[in-house]
Amino acid sequence: MFIVKAEIRDKKGKSFSRKLRIEDKFPGVLYGFNNTPISITMDHNLVFNLQKKEDFYKETLCLLIKEKKYTVKVHAIQRHAFKMKILHIDFIYAKI
């Protein structure tokens, strides 16, 4: 099982997302099962290297947010049109 560390983000919007990407981070969202969506920020290089493996998309992942573990699956990934960059990831809660 892959472990992805994330931080909760308070700010939203295009300008904040651009600032994150300059810092080699990118935004994401965790949602599903009638829970309130959680806006998160992740390290780009860590996730980019993990997503090169096929199992990243097939298996459940462990999302670590503030010492709390969430079992999730990748729902959608938004990538830059021509740069090797991830722009955004949506995660959904996974049933075990």
Image (spheres, grey):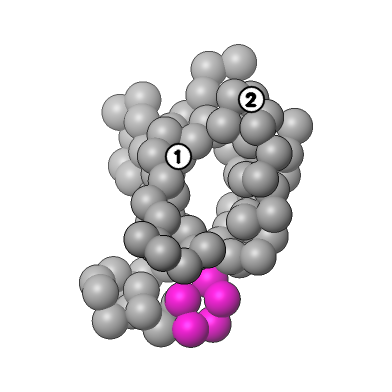
- Image location of residue 88, percent across then percent down: 40, 56
Q: Residue at x 33, y 45 (%)?
A: 37
Numbered circles on residues, count: 2
User: In the orientation shown, which residue stands out farthest toward the top?
Assistant: 96
User: Residues in magenta?
Assistant: 21-25
Q: Residue at x 75, y 32 (%)?
A: 1
- Image location of residue 47, percent across then percent down: 63, 55
N-terminal of the pair, mark 1 or mark 2, is 2
In this picture, residue 66 sits left or right of residue 31:
right
- Image location of residue 11, percent across then percent down: 32, 73
- Image location of residue 24, percent across then percent down: 56, 76
The mark found on residue 37 in the picture is none
Disc 2 marks which residue?
59
Q: Residue at x 65, y 32 (%)?
A: 54
Helix, strand or loop for disc 2: loop
**Which kind of residue does numbered mark 1 sit on?**
Phe
User: In the orientation shown, which residue stands out farthest toward the left?
Assistant: 13
In this picture, residue 95 sits left or right of residue 59:
left
Between 80 and 73, the one lying in front of the other is: 80
Disc 1 marks which residue?
91
